[in-house]
Image: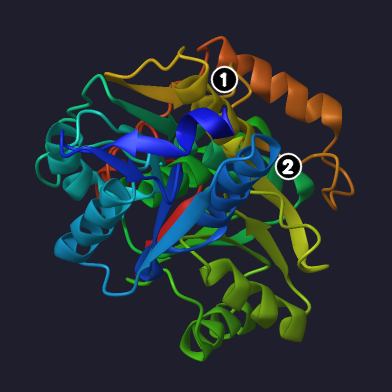
Amino acid sequence: MAAVMSVGILGGCGKKEVTENISVITASADEGYVANKVKEAANRFAMENDLICETHRVTGGSEEDIVAEIEKAAEAGTDVVVCSGAIFELPLYKMQSQFKNIKFIIVDGAPRKAEGKNYKVRKNTRAILYAQEQGGFLAGYAAVKEGYMNLGFMGGVADEGVVRYGIGFVQGANYAAKEMNLSQDKVVIRYAYQGTNEMSPALMEVAGKWYDEGCEVIFASGGSIGTAVMKAAEQKDKKVIGADCDQSQESETVLTSVVKEISDTTFVSITSVYDKTFKGKKAETMDVASGGISLAMGTSRFATFTEKDYSSMVGKLAAGDIDILVEDMDKLIDNEEIIKNVTVNVE
């Protein structure tokens, strides 16, 4: 494979040395656990197959900056561009049409012309999404079943994935409270987006204040803000629920994590480029039924929430027995038939 990829033809201008086969594009404004898992999978595939994998880090984070890095990868003769996050959705909409000979893989997002518009995935692009509302639901359900009554959801940038985590979390907590016959004032959820996905002392301070004011466990989602919440939890002797990958090794405060099968999915997607089984033209959603999203039960620090409890709820979600609404939180709070067993304080 390496011999085949050592030389390529670009734009009909004759033979040119290929300096990279797999191009991972990351954006500093959206870098976190997902981006790291994507990079690890791409580098592992490259090492196992004697290919060249290069990472392009977009420092500016604008659409023009991202486009410039993709153009550099194309000039280097890349076969596949791999990226993650909503920040890549708009630039990929253009790039997938401009570079039809390149395969594009986007994790946690899909190309679209403008924010809020429907996805437009061309045949040279594979978009991988996750049913984050299901992951959030499991996290909220488990937290209340474990006995936590004062919860927090702290999101970073309010993109679609982070929002789905949050609204699922509230509905899962509500479902558990209903099962336990708790009155509405028993379970309180503090809910806010911070407008950034980057770790900072300021976020630590916000999380610390939440804990001081009663939060027992905070579900943190968005880039690397979970690190700030963990540091605050360590100082306050409180708990955190991680997002996107198993974060149990990062802090003793991590109660459990919502896990996306990012590494395996990325690795298999890159493999399909080279074994000629690549299938694009659609946005594929990985859910609990496919094993694409789950709670990290094996490394959890639950005392009373059991594997049996978890499996029972996963079965209900997989069978479609529970409908999780994906409206914004303000609309959900107004829907008294959905959020009526918990109190949600949106900031």
Q: Mark 1: which secondary structure?
A: helix
Could you say where residue 257 lies in the image, as x and y percent from the top left? 68, 49
Q: Residues within 10 Å of mark 2 (few under 14, many from 20)?
A: many
Answer above or below: position of 70 versus 208.
above
Q: CA distance from mark 2 to mark 1?
A: 17 Å
Name the image quarter holding the N terminus.
top right
Image quarter of residue 145: top right
**Which residue is situated farthest in the right direction here?**
303
Answer above or below: position of 331 versus 193.
above
Residue 62 located left or right of residue 319: left
Are the residues at dot 2 and dot 1 in contact (C-beta closer than 8 Å)? Answer: no
Q: What residue type is disc 1 on? A: Leu
Residue 99 located left or right of residue 29: left
Number of the front mark, 2 or 1: 1
Please name the residue that numbered disc 1 is placed on.
317
Which numbered disc covers residue 263? none
